[in-house]
Amino acid sequence: MPHPTSSGQLAAGEREDAQVSRLLTWLSATAIGFLIGIGAKAWFAGHSTHAWVLWSFIGLIALNMLYFASTGNRALQKAGMIVIVGLLFTYLIASGGESNTGPLWFYVFPPLLFYLTDLKTGTAVLLFCYLVAVVVFQFPGLPLVSAEYSMDFKIRFFAALTFESIFCFVLEASRLKARNELLTLAETHEHAARTDELTGLANRREMQNRLAMEFSRYQRSGHHFSIALIDLDLFKQINDQFGHDAGDDVLREFAGLIRTVIRQADVAARWGGEEFLVLLPDTSLLQALTLAERLRSDVSRHAFRFRDQALPVTISAGVCSIAKARSLDDLLKQADLHLYNAKESGRNRIAPRVRSQETDSSPSPSP
Ligand SMILES: Nc1nc2c(ncn2[C@@H]2O[C@H](COP(=O)(O)OP(=O)(O)OP(=O)(O)O)[C@@H](O)[C@H]2O)c(=O)[nH]1
């Protein structure tokens, strides 16, 4: 598997690993069935040693399956399978199997190997197996080697195996390339579907999802949360006076200011036009008001500029806590009502007003 570079690739890697594991379990069961059959055939043909060796591989495969069932360790399941299959094929080459056809099983190895491991490991293991096959072919007198093959067979065996290995390598490399390109494309689309293009904040749809998740968390475990609905004051005038590009710049710069005041767990979204919504998990009304007030004060002190012209930017916000609402809809309605009140009472302010906001321009809100 290639090294994952993002959460999407991690999830895809996890899915593929689970799929490989299922396939391996299925392959192991099939191999056991095959080995029982071929072993029985060898037994009845009078090759009892050969039969027992084949059946002993059943034990190894079953052990590998049992170990995986008890630990769930997929890496070891794969490694175990590769070692067992490698040993089995080496034995088949060394013994010749039935009527010297043992080496033919080796052709199963390259596709399996490249499927189970990455290209580098697959190539390394394959080269090692080549080496073993060369040794067995060249030195038929070695202990445990009982088969002899003609020169013609050896040449054709290696030529066909080399061709197959290269083919498997190229196919697997292009499969991996296409898979990674597809994952990157899917991630780009997924990100675009959740993000507001102009500001880079979450878009309305993403915020609706996050609100729904936070609300069900609140229903499940009682974790309170608050929201702040923020609107840029007299934004139409900025557009009319300085142009639409200036307005866009203000929206981008304001989004940057939001990012500086919220925590990592908070979510800020462009709710529509010049309206923004901030979701504040585990935050009381008072804490949310403090954050909104800090943002308001930061915006009013920030020097917004467009082509050397100073832009007059302020915000108003309506804040509400889920503790004061009956539903998500009600929460949004109340925040909207507070925002309306903030606008009505002169803009550049936060509603509901807390005592310290009314008396102090740099408030330290009291409960
Ligand atoms: N530049 C720019 N302007 C936008 C965008 N989306 C909405 N607007 C403008 O935002 C303005 C909103 O104006 P209004 O709804 O009248 O509100 P306002 O002028 O901010 O006045 P108050 O909300 O009452 O303070 C409109 O002129 C929209 O065209 C955008 O993406 N870029």
Image: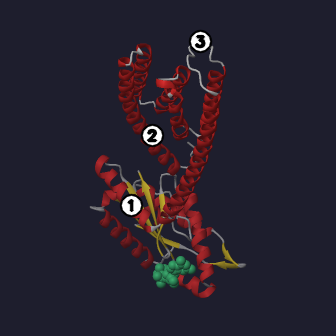
Which amino acid, by three-letter code, is at mark 2? Val
Residue 234 is situated, as x and y percent measured from the top left of the image, at 52, 81
Task: Give the residue furthest to the top.
Answer: 143
Disc number lying in front (1 or 2): 2
State yes or no: discs 2 and 3 in contact (Cβ < 8 Å).
no
State yes or no: discs 3 and 1 in contact (Cβ < 8 Å).
no
Q: Residue at label 1?
A: 209
Q: Please identify the quadrant where the N terminus is shown.
A: top right
Comes first in the chain, label 3 or label 1: 3
Disc number lying in front (3 or 1): 3
Report helix, strand or loop for mark 2: helix
Q: Please identify the quadrant where the C terminus is shown.
A: bottom left
State the count of labels: 3
Q: Residue at label 3?
A: 143
Q: Nearer the viewer, residue 166 or 105?
A: 105
Which amino acid, by three-letter code, is at mark 1? Asn
Q: Is residue 294 left or right of residue 227?
A: right
Above/below status of 141 relative to 213: above
Q: Residue at label 2?
A: 20
Comes first in the chain, label 2 or label 3: 2
Q: Locate residue 277: give its quadrant.
A: bottom left
